[in-house]
Image (cartoon, rainbow, N blue to C red):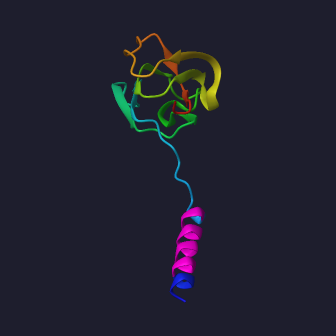
Amino acid sequence: MRLRHTLSTTLGALALIVSLPTSASAATGDFSYNYIGLDGLPQAVTLHDPESPGCITLPEVADPSSSEPAFAPHNDTDVWVMVFTEPDCTGDSWTLRPHGHPATDRLKLRSVFLTERH
């Protein structure tokens, strides 16, 4: 009887663990960029531990008809990042390595794709 109770408790705990949703993975570190705000002044944004893998359209510069692209991205995460000139990870792209140096102001972007962790 005791063995049956222990076995059913163990199976119940195992079923609970298996049924838990898996959490979204995230890159570890910061991805940052600059953009020109509505007031004409430069603004800085940092994404802490951004979700990966996946595409992130930068909200401040998502609409090409109403804003200039962001610039000077810095990938200080543990994953490779592709930066794109257009929203939704389209347009020309450049790859930034993990924990790299900040890019120049000439590198423009509107979206980024973070790869899987390795």
Q: Residue at x 37, y 16 (%)?
A: 102
**Residue 46 occupies quadrant:** top left
**100 lies left or right of 69:** left
Q: From the top left corner, tell me how far across and down residue 117 is, in percent.
A: 51, 33
Comparing 9 with 32, the one in front is 9
Q: Is residue 91 above or below residue 66?
A: above
Q: Is residue 106 above or below residue 20?
A: above
What main secondary structure does the magenta stretch of the protein show? helix
Residue 78 part of the magenta-drawn span: no
State the extent of the magenta-drawn residues as a range.
Answer: 6-18
Q: Is residue 78 visible?
A: yes
Left-right relation of 115 to 75: right
Question: Which quadrant of the view contains residue 100?
Answer: top left
Q: Nearer the viewer, residue 54 or 19?
A: 19
- The quarter holding residue 19 reads bottom right
Q: Residue furthest right?
A: 90
Q: Residue 32's spot in the image, x, y percent?
A: 39, 28
Q: Residue at x 56, y 30 (%)?
A: 115
**Does the rendering let one see residue 36?**
no
* Front position in the image: 63 or 107: 107
Q: Look at the image and tell me in which quarter the N terminus lies.
A: bottom right
